[in-house]
Image: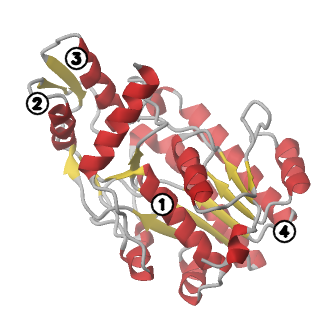
Amino acid sequence: MKKTLKKKKIFIAGHNGMVGSAILRHFKNLGFNKIITQKRKNLDLTNWNKTYNFIKKEKPDIVVNCAGRVGGILDNFKYPKEFLFENIYIQLNLINSCFKNKVKTYVNLGSSCIYPKKAKQPIKESYLLSGKLENTNEAYAIAKIVGLKSCEYYNRQFKTNYLTLMPCNMYGPNDNFEINSSHFIPGLINKFYFASSKNIKNVEVWGSGKPKREIMYVDDLASAVFFVISKLETKNKVILKTLKKYPYINIGTGKDYTIKQYASMINKLFGGEIKLKFNKKYPDGTPRKLLDCSFINGLGWKPKISIENGLKNTLSWYIKKYK
């Protein structure tokens, strides 16, 4: 890594969230000391004037957007308006503020859930908008597509190098463990911990347990963000050429398991004696979401943290934080 990159001013939007905090931690560990952060209560990214003035004042060289409203199936289904509006405003305000203030490198965080519900597996970047979206998170998906396409249109019209990363399901420290609004991994950890501590013999798993999901420990995503920024800053010809065609890159592990299998993995952390009860009244969502990560792998990046270690680390953090 060139020393000049460490001297760059980097604004991490959403630094208190799971992804943002992991990226902040990763960059600090690498020796970056010009990192800009701002708490949500002090900077409303849904407000154009506040966002623009902040970027103008701080003059970052690099902006990483981890901010936004996220949640599981139930939360998405109950609050579609909030998921749509908040995420669209945040993305458009940040992208346009970066452009108007001549920020050279902008990295946006998307999600694998914005691909079509019945996309061919594994999902290539080119499959975007090739079919109908999953109904349970349609509002969030549409909002993230707006952000992704905005990067594409700025690149096409103004020759910028704005990029969206498309990670699979993330989990790890600083995740949301509240059962009704969380994703399935933190929600299951919460349920199993409660059942174990109260000597309850079973845990309810929403849905049939059959859908397959690809998950990745959040520190691996942080390393991917740094990897991609390094390529953008050094004007890597391969990634710049790709931006002209698909200004978004899949980030994942290349492996997936069923919800039932993940529940069993978490169960083992508590001794494996708790029985699983599947509540099929809850929707399953997309049947499968496995990303084709051949492009990012071809550039030289791969995840390093195993599911076993990732789940252990997450449970350890959860216990220290909440119990």
Residue at x 84% of width, y 68% of height: 102
Q: Is residue 18 left or right of residue 204?
A: right
- Earlier sequence position, callout 1 versus callout 4: 4
Which numbered tag is attached to residue 195? 3
Indicate the quadrant containing the C terminus: top left, top right, bottom left or bottom right. top left
Image quarter (top left, top right, bottom left or bottom right) of the N terminus: bottom right
Q: Quadrant of residue 14?
A: top right
What residue sits right under mark 2 in the picture?
272
Indicate which label's residue lies in the foreground, 4 or 3.
3
Q: Give the mark, 1 or 2, whose residue is nearer the N terminus.
A: 1
Q: Secondary structure at mark 4?
A: loop
Q: Residue at x 24, y 24 (%)?
A: 192
Question: How many residues crowd mark 3 within 10 Å: few (<14), some (14–19), many (20+)?
Answer: some
Q: Amino acid at mark 3?
A: Ala
- CA gap, disc 2 to disc 3? 12 Å
Image marks 2 and 3: residues in contact by CB distance under 8 Å: no
Camera-side residue: 103 or 134?
Answer: 103
Q: Which residue lies under the disc numbered 1?
A: 166
Residue 74, percent from left and from top: 40, 28
For this rendering, which residue is in front, 212 or 199?
199
Residue 26, percent across and down?
Answer: 55, 56
Residue 74 in sight here: no
Q: Quick one: label 4 or label 3, which is nearer the N terminus?
A: 4
